[in-house]
Image: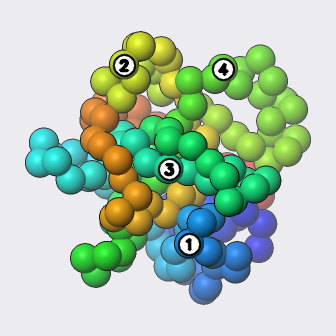
Amino acid sequence: MSILRRVAALISGATSGTTSGTTATAPTAPAGGVSPRYAPEIDGEPDPGEVVWAWVPYEDDPSQGKDRPVLVLDTAGDGEADGWVGLMLSSQDHDRDAADEARHGRYWMDVGSGGWDSQGRPSEVRLDRLIHLRRDGVRREGAALDARIFAEVVAAVRGLPG
């Protein structure tokens, strides 16, 4: 199953069995469905709809990565240690090379700026790469994304080609 189909299936709640290639250094989508819901709370814990900072591995070398903002979509399970599932954000503008990004299976959406970026830069969310955040991998809470934009992100992920 292609990554685009797997992400769309996970977001829509369909089950996909196990995810191959899951390692401790390269978080990927957990098996089963993800049910995105908007439920931010000012409680110091990541909640769906919030942008948090966490270490995200590079795709081409999962042993390396960087701290970046991640939009939390859902919890990754019922267990205390399961963590969360989200989509990474970037302040880099991908509109200029959107066709090339899509050719390589990468899809981005503008989400604007927010309290997650101390410089107030506009951000884009990567729609096709679901990130599993372990509880010990989240560095800090950033800010809640606007509810309308969160709903648009979820709709855009569900509408991915493939």
Marks 1 and 4, Cα distance to the nearest angstrom? 29 Å
Residue drawn at point x = 66 percent, y = 20 percent: 93
User: Which of these two is toward me, 141 or 153?
Assistant: 141
> Which of labels 3 and 4 is toward the front?
3
Whether residues under marks 1 and 4 lie with C-beta atoms below 8 angstroms apart, the answer is no
Element type at mark 2: loop
Which mark is first along the chain, 4 or 1?
A: 1
Residue drawn at point x = 56 percent, y = 72 percent: 24
Circle 4: is it few (<14), some (14-19), or many (20+) Cα within 10 Å? some
Which mark is on residue 24? Answer: 1
Q: Amino acid at mark 4?
A: Asp
Q: Position of residue 133 (x, y in %)?
A: 44, 60
Marks 1 and 2, Cα distance to the nearest angstrom? 29 Å
Residue drawn at point x = 66 percent, y = 52 percent: 64
Q: Amino acid at mark 2?
A: Ser
Residue on which the image places disc 2: 118
Q: Amino acid at mark 3?
A: Trp
Which mark is first along the chain, 2 or 4?
A: 4
Which mark is first along the chain, 4 or 3?
A: 3
Which mark is first along the chain, 1 or 3?
A: 1
Circle 2: is it few (<14), some (14-19), or many (20+) Cα within 10 Å? few
Marks 4 and 2, Cα distance to the nearest angstrom? 17 Å
Which mark is first along the chain, 2 or 1?
A: 1
Q: Amino acid at mark 1?
A: Ala
